[in-house]
Amino acid sequence: MALLEIDGLSKEFDGLRALDQVSFATEVGEILGVIGPNGAGKTTLFNLISGIYPATAGEVVFQGRSILGMKSHQISRLGIGRTFQIVRPFQNLDVEMNILVAYGHRFYPDLWNSMGHFRKNEILKEVQGYIERTGLQSYRKQLTKNLPLGIKKRVEIARALALKPRLLLLDEPSGGLRFEESGQLMDLIRTVRDQGISVLLIEHNMQVVMDLCKRIVVLDHGSKIAEGSPEAIRSNPQVIEAYLGKSLRPEEEEG
Ligand SMILES: Nc1ncnc2c1ncn2[C@@H]1O[C@H](COP(=O)(O)OP(=O)(O)OP(=O)(O)O)[C@@H](O)[C@H]1O
Ligand SMILES: [Mg+2]
Protein backbone atom coordinates (compact mmCIF):
# COMPACT_ATOMS: atom_id res chain seq x y z
CA MET A 1 0.00 0.00 0.00
CA ALA A 2 1.18 3.51 -0.75
CA LEU A 3 2.09 5.59 2.29
CA LEU A 4 0.75 8.80 0.79
CA GLU A 5 -1.59 9.06 -2.17
CA ILE A 6 -2.33 12.37 -3.86
CA ASP A 7 -5.21 12.38 -6.31
CA GLY A 8 -6.29 15.27 -8.53
CA LEU A 9 -5.02 17.77 -6.00
CA SER A 10 -5.70 21.39 -6.98
CA LYS A 11 -5.32 24.80 -5.39
CA GLU A 12 -6.49 28.16 -6.63
CA PHE A 13 -5.40 31.48 -5.19
CA ASP A 14 -7.67 34.27 -6.43
CA GLY A 15 -8.11 32.67 -9.83
CA LEU A 16 -4.46 31.55 -10.08
CA ARG A 17 -4.12 27.77 -10.39
CA ALA A 18 -1.10 27.16 -8.20
CA LEU A 19 -1.69 23.41 -8.33
CA ASP A 20 -3.70 21.70 -11.05
CA GLN A 21 -4.95 18.11 -10.78
CA VAL A 22 -1.73 16.65 -9.40
CA SER A 23 -1.67 12.90 -8.67
CA PHE A 24 1.13 10.61 -7.45
CA ALA A 25 1.92 8.23 -4.61
CA THR A 26 4.81 7.76 -2.19
CA GLU A 27 5.91 4.31 -1.14
CA VAL A 28 7.20 3.31 2.28
CA GLY A 29 10.96 3.72 2.56
CA GLU A 30 11.58 5.91 -0.47
CA ILE A 31 12.90 9.41 -1.04
CA LEU A 32 10.65 10.86 -3.72
CA GLY A 33 11.99 13.98 -5.40
CA VAL A 34 9.69 16.89 -6.29
CA ILE A 35 11.24 19.33 -8.73
CA GLY A 36 10.12 22.14 -11.00
CA PRO A 37 10.97 25.76 -11.86
CA ASN A 38 10.20 28.68 -9.53
CA GLY A 39 6.47 29.08 -8.98
CA ALA A 40 5.72 25.54 -10.20
CA GLY A 41 3.59 24.81 -7.14
CA LYS A 42 6.03 22.69 -5.08
CA THR A 43 5.65 24.53 -1.77
CA THR A 44 1.90 24.81 -2.35
CA LEU A 45 1.79 21.02 -2.67
CA PHE A 46 3.49 20.70 0.74
CA ASN A 47 1.18 23.32 2.24
CA LEU A 48 -1.84 21.31 1.11
CA ILE A 49 -0.47 17.97 2.36
CA SER A 50 0.42 19.46 5.73
CA GLY A 51 -2.92 21.23 6.13
CA ILE A 52 -1.68 24.81 6.00
CA TYR A 53 -4.08 25.65 3.16
CA PRO A 54 -7.33 23.92 2.26
CA ALA A 55 -7.33 22.32 -1.20
CA THR A 56 -9.68 23.55 -3.91
CA ALA A 57 -10.20 19.98 -5.17
CA GLY A 58 -8.70 16.53 -4.96
CA GLU A 59 -7.76 14.06 -2.27
CA VAL A 60 -4.83 13.34 0.04
CA VAL A 61 -4.75 9.89 1.64
CA PHE A 62 -2.14 9.01 4.26
CA GLN A 63 -1.88 5.39 5.42
CA GLY A 64 -5.24 4.64 3.89
CA ARG A 65 -7.05 7.55 5.52
CA SER A 66 -8.14 10.89 4.02
CA ILE A 67 -6.38 13.77 5.74
CA LEU A 68 -7.90 16.53 3.63
CA GLY A 69 -9.53 19.16 5.79
CA MET A 70 -7.56 18.19 8.89
CA LYS A 71 -5.63 20.84 10.81
CA SER A 72 -1.82 21.03 10.62
CA HIS A 73 -1.30 19.76 14.15
CA GLN A 74 -3.59 16.78 13.55
CA ILE A 75 -1.69 15.89 10.40
CA SER A 76 1.69 16.16 12.12
CA ARG A 77 0.41 13.95 14.92
CA LEU A 78 -0.69 11.36 12.36
CA GLY A 79 2.91 11.15 11.21
CA ILE A 80 3.68 13.76 8.56
CA GLY A 81 6.53 16.06 9.57
CA ARG A 82 7.92 18.94 7.56
CA THR A 83 10.57 21.60 7.30
CA PHE A 84 10.12 24.98 5.64
CA GLN A 85 11.86 26.62 2.69
CA ILE A 86 12.76 29.53 4.99
CA VAL A 87 14.03 28.06 8.26
CA ARG A 88 11.86 28.89 11.24
CA PRO A 89 13.28 27.48 14.47
CA PHE A 90 12.82 29.44 17.71
CA GLN A 91 15.84 31.70 17.33
CA ASN A 92 16.13 32.59 21.01
CA LEU A 93 16.08 29.02 22.29
CA ASP A 94 19.07 26.73 22.29
CA VAL A 95 19.17 23.65 20.08
CA GLU A 96 18.07 21.30 22.84
CA MET A 97 15.06 23.45 23.79
CA ASN A 98 14.05 23.76 20.15
CA ILE A 99 13.85 19.99 19.87
CA LEU A 100 12.19 19.67 23.26
CA VAL A 101 9.43 22.09 22.26
CA ALA A 102 8.79 20.13 19.07
CA TYR A 103 8.79 16.89 21.06
CA GLY A 104 6.31 18.45 23.49
CA HIS A 105 3.87 19.12 20.66
CA ARG A 106 3.00 15.45 20.75
CA PHE A 107 1.71 15.95 24.30
CA TYR A 108 0.35 19.46 23.90
CA PRO A 109 -0.78 21.56 25.77
CA ASP A 110 1.33 20.91 28.84
CA LEU A 111 4.43 18.83 28.34
CA TRP A 112 5.65 18.33 31.90
CA ASN A 113 2.22 17.86 33.48
CA SER A 114 0.97 15.44 30.89
CA MET A 115 4.19 13.44 30.92
CA GLY A 116 4.63 13.65 34.68
CA HIS A 117 7.58 15.55 36.07
CA PHE A 118 9.38 12.35 36.99
CA ARG A 119 9.80 11.57 33.31
CA LYS A 120 11.86 14.70 32.65
CA ASN A 121 15.20 12.87 32.47
CA GLU A 122 13.74 10.23 30.22
CA ILE A 123 12.44 12.92 27.86
CA LEU A 124 15.75 14.78 27.83
CA LYS A 125 17.45 11.50 26.99
CA GLU A 126 15.15 11.03 24.03
CA VAL A 127 15.85 14.60 22.90
CA GLN A 128 19.56 13.80 23.21
CA GLY A 129 18.91 10.90 20.83
CA TYR A 130 17.58 13.29 18.17
CA ILE A 131 20.57 15.57 18.74
CA GLU A 132 22.91 12.65 18.09
CA ARG A 133 20.99 11.36 15.09
CA THR A 134 21.28 14.77 13.44
CA GLY A 135 24.92 15.40 14.41
CA LEU A 136 24.16 18.39 16.63
CA GLN A 137 26.07 17.29 19.75
CA SER A 138 28.48 20.22 19.76
CA TYR A 139 25.66 22.76 19.34
CA ARG A 140 23.31 21.46 22.04
CA LYS A 141 23.45 24.51 24.34
CA GLN A 142 23.97 27.17 21.66
CA LEU A 143 21.30 29.71 20.81
CA THR A 144 19.84 28.81 17.45
CA LYS A 145 20.05 32.39 16.13
CA ASN A 146 23.86 32.29 16.31
CA LEU A 147 24.21 29.12 14.24
CA PRO A 148 25.10 28.92 10.55
CA LEU A 149 22.28 28.11 8.14
CA GLY A 150 23.45 24.52 7.57
CA ILE A 151 23.18 23.81 11.30
CA LYS A 152 19.80 25.56 11.58
CA LYS A 153 18.54 23.26 8.86
CA ARG A 154 19.72 20.29 10.90
CA VAL A 155 17.84 21.68 13.89
CA GLU A 156 14.71 21.84 11.75
CA ILE A 157 15.12 18.23 10.73
CA ALA A 158 15.71 17.22 14.36
CA ARG A 159 12.52 19.08 15.34
CA ALA A 160 10.57 17.29 12.63
CA LEU A 161 11.99 13.92 13.71
CA ALA A 162 10.97 14.57 17.31
CA LEU A 163 7.36 14.38 16.14
CA LYS A 164 8.06 10.74 15.16
CA PRO A 165 6.96 11.06 11.55
CA ARG A 166 6.47 8.22 9.08
CA LEU A 167 6.80 10.75 6.27
CA LEU A 168 8.98 13.85 6.19
CA LEU A 169 8.35 16.74 3.77
CA LEU A 170 11.58 18.66 3.14
CA ASP A 171 11.27 21.94 1.24
CA GLU A 172 14.62 22.78 -0.38
CA PRO A 173 16.80 21.66 2.53
CA SER A 174 20.00 22.46 0.64
CA GLY A 175 18.88 25.96 -0.41
CA GLY A 176 21.48 28.56 0.52
CA LEU A 177 24.01 25.97 1.70
CA ARG A 178 27.64 25.65 0.68
CA PHE A 179 28.60 22.54 -1.26
CA GLU A 180 30.04 20.75 1.77
CA GLU A 181 27.11 21.60 4.05
CA SER A 182 24.71 20.41 1.38
CA GLY A 183 26.55 17.07 1.09
CA GLN A 184 26.34 16.56 4.85
CA LEU A 185 22.64 17.32 4.84
CA MET A 186 22.02 14.82 2.07
CA ASP A 187 23.87 12.17 4.09
CA LEU A 188 21.51 12.97 6.96
CA ILE A 189 18.46 12.60 4.71
CA ARG A 190 19.74 9.22 3.58
CA THR A 191 20.18 8.15 7.20
CA VAL A 192 16.64 9.28 8.00
CA ARG A 193 15.33 7.19 5.10
CA ASP A 194 17.38 4.19 6.27
CA GLN A 195 15.65 4.48 9.65
CA GLY A 196 12.36 3.79 7.89
CA ILE A 197 11.05 7.32 7.39
CA SER A 198 9.85 8.12 3.88
CA VAL A 199 10.86 11.48 2.47
CA LEU A 200 9.26 13.85 -0.01
CA LEU A 201 12.07 16.13 -1.11
CA ILE A 202 11.70 19.44 -2.94
CA GLU A 203 15.11 20.27 -4.33
CA HIS A 204 16.50 22.80 -6.77
CA ASN A 205 19.92 21.23 -7.13
CA MET A 206 19.56 18.60 -9.86
CA GLN A 207 22.70 16.73 -8.88
CA VAL A 208 21.43 16.36 -5.33
CA VAL A 209 17.99 15.14 -6.36
CA MET A 210 19.36 12.74 -8.97
CA ASP A 211 21.77 11.25 -6.40
CA LEU A 212 19.20 10.81 -3.66
CA CYS A 213 16.01 9.79 -5.44
CA LYS A 214 15.09 6.75 -7.47
CA ARG A 215 11.88 8.45 -8.53
CA ILE A 216 11.11 12.09 -9.25
CA VAL A 217 7.89 14.02 -9.86
CA VAL A 218 8.18 17.17 -11.98
CA LEU A 219 5.78 20.11 -11.63
CA ASP A 220 5.48 23.06 -14.00
CA HIS A 221 2.87 25.82 -13.79
CA GLY A 222 0.98 23.78 -11.21
CA SER A 223 0.73 20.60 -13.29
CA LYS A 224 2.64 17.34 -13.09
CA ILE A 225 4.51 17.11 -16.38
CA ALA A 226 6.60 14.00 -15.68
CA GLU A 227 7.29 11.23 -13.18
CA GLY A 228 10.03 8.61 -13.34
CA SER A 229 13.63 7.63 -12.73
CA PRO A 230 16.37 10.29 -12.75
CA GLU A 231 17.51 8.99 -16.15
CA ALA A 232 14.02 9.28 -17.64
CA ILE A 233 13.51 12.74 -16.14
CA ARG A 234 16.88 14.03 -17.34
CA SER A 235 16.11 13.17 -20.94
CA ASN A 236 12.41 14.10 -20.92
CA PRO A 237 11.89 16.87 -23.52
CA GLN A 238 9.03 18.50 -21.57
CA VAL A 239 11.21 18.69 -18.47
CA ILE A 240 14.13 20.15 -20.38
CA GLU A 241 11.78 22.69 -21.93
CA ALA A 242 10.27 23.64 -18.57
CA TYR A 243 13.68 24.17 -17.04
CA LEU A 244 15.59 25.79 -19.82
CA GLY A 245 12.92 27.74 -21.62
CA LYS A 246 12.87 28.21 -25.38
CA SER A 247 15.69 30.75 -25.51
CA LEU A 248 18.16 28.19 -24.20
CA ARG A 249 17.39 25.35 -26.58
CA PRO A 250 20.60 24.07 -28.20
CA GLU A 251 19.71 25.11 -31.76
CA GLU A 252 19.00 28.66 -30.61
CA GLU A 253 22.18 28.83 -28.57
CA GLU A 254 24.16 28.05 -31.69
CA GLY A 255 22.33 30.61 -33.81
N1 LIG B 1 -0.58 32.22 -0.27
C1 LIG B 1 -0.58 32.49 -1.58
N2 LIG B 1 -1.39 33.43 -2.10
C2 LIG B 1 -1.40 33.69 -3.42
N3 LIG B 1 -0.61 33.06 -4.32
C3 LIG B 1 0.24 32.13 -3.86
C4 LIG B 1 0.31 31.79 -2.47
N4 LIG B 1 1.23 30.80 -2.31
C5 LIG B 1 1.72 30.56 -3.53
N5 LIG B 1 1.12 31.32 -4.46
C6 LIG B 1 1.39 31.32 -5.90
O1 LIG B 1 1.28 29.98 -6.35
C7 LIG B 1 2.28 29.69 -7.32
C8 LIG B 1 3.11 28.51 -6.85
O2 LIG B 1 3.90 28.94 -5.77
P1 LIG B 1 4.81 27.96 -4.94
O3 LIG B 1 5.37 28.75 -3.81
O4 LIG B 1 4.05 26.74 -4.59
O5 LIG B 1 5.95 27.60 -5.98
P2 LIG B 1 7.31 26.80 -5.79
O6 LIG B 1 7.32 25.73 -6.82
O7 LIG B 1 7.48 26.39 -4.39
O8 LIG B 1 8.40 27.91 -6.19
P3 LIG B 1 9.91 28.16 -5.63
O9 LIG B 1 10.78 27.19 -6.36
O10 LIG B 1 10.20 29.57 -6.02
O11 LIG B 1 9.90 27.96 -4.15
C9 LIG B 1 3.07 30.96 -7.52
O12 LIG B 1 2.54 31.64 -8.63
C10 LIG B 1 2.82 31.73 -6.25
O13 LIG B 1 2.92 33.11 -6.44
MG1 LIG C 1 8.84 26.81 -2.91
Image (cartoon, rainbow, N blue to C red):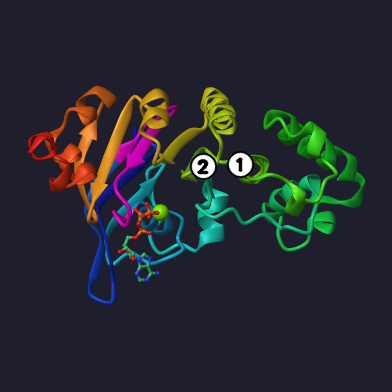
Depth check, mark 1 against mark 2: the one in front is: 2
Q: Is residue 196 left or right of residue 124?
A: left
What is the quadrant of residue 54 in the picture? bottom left
Q: Position of residue 234 (x, y in %)?
A: 23, 29
Q: Which residue is drawn at 26% across and 47% down?
A: 219
Q: Do the residues labelled 1 and 2 touch (CB within 8 Å)?
A: yes
Q: Position of residue 138 (x, y in %)?
A: 81, 33
Q: In this view, does 254 lie to the left or right of 190?
A: left
Which quarter is ligand 1 in? bottom left
Residue extending furthest toward the front: 255
As shown in the figure, which amino acid type bears the numbered disc 2? Pro
> Disc 1 marks which residue?
157
> Disc 2 marks which residue?
173
The region drawn magenta spans: 25-41
Whether 247 is drawn above or below 129: the answer is below
In front of the other: 50 or 113? 50
Q: In this view, does 98 lie to the left or right of 84?
A: right
Element carrying mark 1: helix
What is the quadrant of residue 160 in the picture? top right
**Quadrant of the snapshot with the C terminus:** top left
Task: Check mark 1 vs ligand 2: CB closer than 8 Å? yes or no.
Answer: no
Q: Where is residue 182 in the image (x, y as percent from the top left)?
A: 54, 33
Q: Position of residue 16 (x, y in %)?
A: 24, 70
Local crowd size for mark 1, using a 10 Å CA cut-off: few (<14), some (14–19), many (≥20): many
Q: Is residue 7 magenta?
A: no
Residue extending furthest toward the right: 118
Q: Which residue is drawn at 10% across and 34% down?
A: 254
Q: How many labels does the image show?
A: 2
Q: Is residue 29 magenta?
A: yes
The residues bearing labels 1 and 2 have C-alpha atoms spaced at a distance of 9 Å
Q: Which residue is drawn at 26% across and 25% down?
A: 229
